């Protein structure tokens, strides 16, 4: 029997000397303002208990972790059509890389690199008329916090500097792989990435996947098969071109974001979230990766 509270405390003890390591993302200027000397860790067990330590209640920018939940919403609309618009292979290149997209005729490698996530948001927008509103509604319900919101300063900062994301979206539009006008889809994409959420809240939301698609209120959002598919994509594509290293080192399906958060899912057991703003060269948080590595060693819950 694993004592999750004790495990969380040990994670903090291990990570403490490393807090502040890595570099905060500065390509989105608002993220560059975040104090790097913060660290939070939270584990939500499938029976609903949450154990957290450190800055577990401090809200951070969700960024690419949002991509897991937009994909869940698209699949919940029974939308197999999405798999004609995006592949399911690791890219082996940076999350915002352009070159593969041209070779592969505007079909992104997977839903977790930026190009793939823009397609998923575009599909959700076509399905619902309000991609951001659908995502925010889901996260509010799963975290139990109706005040979860978009940080408008970060969203504006993303939009002002989002030349690469615009280039990706326009290239896909040129290949006929956008349903909505580029600026409209990107507006939803920038704002979904700018939702702020704490480690404790995100761990609660992550239970959706640990419970194979069951929501906090007991209703079903995803079929067990779709939930398993999302988790498999987290393992192969979640930490971008470091997915192999993450599988080797941590052995848990993870999704990272340049806000410094990493969500890990242990099916049937828990969702764990670690957050530290300093990133490595792949855009994954240094302290969050160390925290999940430690958590895996303490619990033995690697899926391998
Ligand atoms: N909003 C970020 C971007 O579009 C998301 C990237 C990330 O978290 N890796 O660049």
Image (cartoon, rainbow, N blue to C red):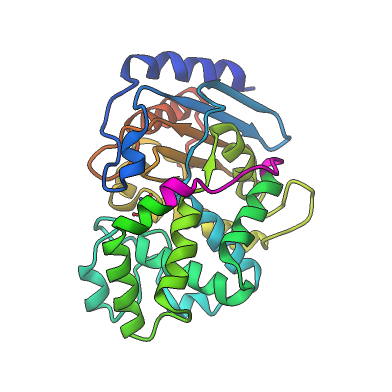
Instruction: Pinpoint residue 304: horizontal percent, then vertical percent.
Output: 45, 42
Up the image or down, 205 lies above or below 12; here it is below
Residue 200 in the image: above or below residue 222: above
**277 shown above or below 183:** above
Query: Residue at the spot x=48%, y=68% of the render?
Result: 120
Give how far across and how far down residue 294 sits, in percent.
Answer: 42, 25
Q: Main secondary structure of the magenta part?
A: loop
Q: Quadrant of the N terminus?
A: top right
Q: Residue furthest right?
A: 218
Position of residue 260 in the picture relative to residue 273 (left or right): left
Q: Is residue 149 magenta?
A: yes
| Res. 160 in view | yes
Going 31% across and 32% down the picture, which residue do you hit? 278
Residue 148 occupies quadrant: top right
* Span highlighted in magenta in the image: 143-155
Q: State the residue at coordinates (20%, 69%).
A: 99
Spot occupied by residue 51 in the image (x, y as percentages of width and height) = 62, 24
Judge by depth and name the residue closer to the eye, 130 or 215: 130
193 displayed left or right of 134: left
Quarter occupied by residue 292: top left
Q: Is residue 229 above or below residue 24?
A: below
Q: Quadrant of residue 72?
A: bottom right
- Residue 248 makes an appearance in the image: no
Q: Is residue 94 left or right of residue 227?
A: left
Q: Measuring 39% from the left and 54% from the top, which residue is drawn there?
A: 236
Give percent across and percent down for residue 233: 45, 57
């Amino acid at each position: 029997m694993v004592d999750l509270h004790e495990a969380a405390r040990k994670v903090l003890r291990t990570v403490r000397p490393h807090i502040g390591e890595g570099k905060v993302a500065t390509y989105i200027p608002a993220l560059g303002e975040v104090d790097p000397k913060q660290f939070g860790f939270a584990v939500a067990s499938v029976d609903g208990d949450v154990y957290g330590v450190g800055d577990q209640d401090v809200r951070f920018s969700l960024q690419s972790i949002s991509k897991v939940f937009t994909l869940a919403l698209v699949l919940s609309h029974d939308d197999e059509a999405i798999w004609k618009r995006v592949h399911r292979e690791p890219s082996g290149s940076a999350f915002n890389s352009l070159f593969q997209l041209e070779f592969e005729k505007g079909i992104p490698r997977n839903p977790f690199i930026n190009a793939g996530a823009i397609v998923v948001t575009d599909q959700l927008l076509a399905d619902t008329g309000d991609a951001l509103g659908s995502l925010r509604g889901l996260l509010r319900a799963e975290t139990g916090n109706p005040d979860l919101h978009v940080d408008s300063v970060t969203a504006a900062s993303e939009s002002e500097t989002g030349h690469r994301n615009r280039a990706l979206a326009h290239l896909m539009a040129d290949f006929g792989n956008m349903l909505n006008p580029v600026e409209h889809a990107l507006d939803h994409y920038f704002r979904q990435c700018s939702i702020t959420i704490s480690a404790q809240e995100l761990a609660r939301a992550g239970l959706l996947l640990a419970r194979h698609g069951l929501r906090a209120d007991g209703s079903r959002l995803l079929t067990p098969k779709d939930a398993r598919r999302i988790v498999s994509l987290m393992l192969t594509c979640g930490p971008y071109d470091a997915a192999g290293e993450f599988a080797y080192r941590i052995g848990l399906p993870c999704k990272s974001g340049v806000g410094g958060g990493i969500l890990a899912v242990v099916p049937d057991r828990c969702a764990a979230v670690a957050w530290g703003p300093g990133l490595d060269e792949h855009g994954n948080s240094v302290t969050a990766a160390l925290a999940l590595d430690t958590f895996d060693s303490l619990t033995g819950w690697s899926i391998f």
